[in-house]
Image (cartoon, grey):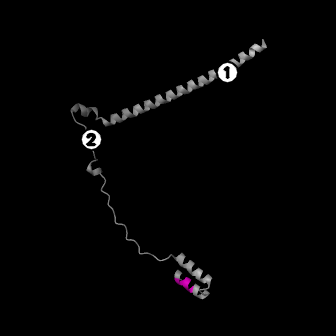
Amino acid sequence: MLRRRRPLLRAAAVGGGAYIAGKHMANKANEQAAYEADQDQRISDLEAQQQGYQQAPPDYQQQGYQQQQYQQPPPQYQQPPPQYQQPPPAAPAAGPSVYDQLSQLATLHDQGALTDDEFSAAKAKLLGT
């Protein structure tokens, strides 16, 4: 008798697992369908709202007035044409920067081409002090 119970227990466990998995998939499908239905409803509401804005009010339609649709906004709402300014004239080509000139002086001083006094005088002249 004990031998017979094991296959039944195994079959019950497999069947129960399959039942739970199927139930889970069905719940997911129902949630997805509800989400899509809600989204479709919101889209329909927005489309109806947009159509309501595009139609003329009912009292205008009853009196025979026609809805005017402007291709461009009225003149007082139009933006003025853009005014382009000429770019400023290019500055004349500048010589090497102060940093480059100081580097060159330091290189000449390190090579021995300039004495300490000459280097100091050239640096003071360059820095304006």
**Between residues 52 and 118, which one lies in front from this camera angle?**
118
Report the residue marked by disc 1: 14
Rendered residue at 30%/50% (across/down): 77
Say the numbered circle drawn on residue 37: none
**Residue 61 appears in which quarter of the rendering?**
top left
Q: Amino acid at mark 2?
A: Gln
Residue 43 placed where, x, y %? 42, 33
Residue 123 placed where, x, y %? 56, 82
Quadrant showing the N terminus: top right
**57 to 107, vertically: above or below:** above
Determine the residue located farthest toward the top in the rendered image: 1
Rendered residue at 40%/34% (across/down): 46
- Secondary structure of the residue carrying numbered label 1: helix
**Residue 92 appears in which quarter of the rendering?**
bottom left
Residue 70 placed where, x, y %? 27, 43
Say the numbered circle drawn on residue 69: 2
Q: Which residues are drawn in magenta?
A: 120-125
Label 1, residues with CA under 10 Å away: few <14, some 14-19, many ≥20: few
**62 to 117, vertically: above or below:** above
**Between residues 6 and 24, which one lies in front from this camera angle?**
6
Q: Amino acid at mark 1?
A: Val
Determine the residue located farthest toward the left in the rendered image: 64
Rendered residue at 58%/85% (across/down): 119
Left or right of 12 in this view: 31: left
Looking at the image, is mark 1 or mark 2 nearer the viewer?
1
Q: Main secondary structure of the magenta part?
A: helix
Considering only order in the chain, which callout, 2 or 1, is on the residue closer to the N terminus?
1
**Residue 93 appears in which quarter of the rendering?**
bottom left
- Secondary structure of the residue carrying numbered label 2: loop
Would residue 127 be counted in the magenta stretch? no
Determine the residue located farthest toward the right in the rendered image: 2
Separation of marks 1 and 2 at Cα, in angstroms: 68 Å
